[in-house]
Image: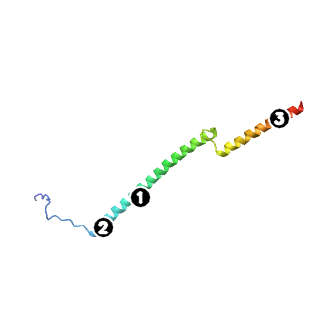
């Protein structure tokens, strides 16, 4: 029996069931859609992780620098400090007066 070598010519045809073809196309579309959704979800999570890391770093700097006064003070703090200074001066005057009365 001679070996028949298949050749390609104009009469070559392929029989594909249309039902199977539609199922394959639908499966490919669903796979691509799931891939895009998963990729989008991963991108969002990475962005959120980056934002969280930045906020944590800023919070750490704030936690360290605020008590030291490196970041300044609130206007209310400045007003309170002025009032305390005034009260300290008044107390010093009263102490001097009391000392003068005791002599």
Q: Is residue 52 above or below residue 15?
A: above
Residue 32 pos. (x, y %): 36, 59
Q: Quadrant of residue 73?
A: top right
| Marks 1 and 3, the one that precedes in the sequence | 1
Other residues around mark 1 within 10 Å, as few (<14) / some (14–19) / many (≥20): few
Vertical placement of residue 30 versus 75, above or below = below
Q: Closer to the camera: disc 2 or disc 3?
A: 3
Q: Mark 1 falls on what kind of element?
A: helix
Q: In terms of secondary structure, where does tag 3 sit? A: helix
User: Gap in Å between the C-alphas at discs 1 and 3?
Assistant: 76 Å
Question: What's the mark number on residue 22?
Answer: 2
Q: Report the front residue among 40 and 20.
A: 40
Quarter placement of the C terminus: top right
Name which of mark 2 and mark 1 comes first in the sequence.
2
- Looking at the image, which residue is at 44% across and 55% down? 41
Q: CA distance from mark 2 to mark 3?
A: 98 Å
Instruction: Give residue 6's position: percent from left, percent from top.
Output: 14, 59
Q: Residues within 10 Å of mark 3 (few under 14, many from 20)?
A: few
Q: Are marks 2 and 1 in contact (CB under 8 Å)?
A: no
User: Mark 1 = which residue?
Assistant: 37
Contact between marks 1 and 3 (CB within 8 A): the answer is no
Image quadrant holding the N terminus, namely bottom left
Which residue lies at the image location 30% right of the left edge and 67% below the top edge? 22
Residue 45, how many percent across, how many down? Answer: 47, 52
Q: Is residue 27 left or right of residue 62?
A: left
Which residue is nearer to you in this view: 82 or 77?
82
Along the polypeptide, which appears first: circle 2 or circle 3?
2
- Give the residue number, with chain letter if any, for mark 3: 95
């Amino acid at each position: 029996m001679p070996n028949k070598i298949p050749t390609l010519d104009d009469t070559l045809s392929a029989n594909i069931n249309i039902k199977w073809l539609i199922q394959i196309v639908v499966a490919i579309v669903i796979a691509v859609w799931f891939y895009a959704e998963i990729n989008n979800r991963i991108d969002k999570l990475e962005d959120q992780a980056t934002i969280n890391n930045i906020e944590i770093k800023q919070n750490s700097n704030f936690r360290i620098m605020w008590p030291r006064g490196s970041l300044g003070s609130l206007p209310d703090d400045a007003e309170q400090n002025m009032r305390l200074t005034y009260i300290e001066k008044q107390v010093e005057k009263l102490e001097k007066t009391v000392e003068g009365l005791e002599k």
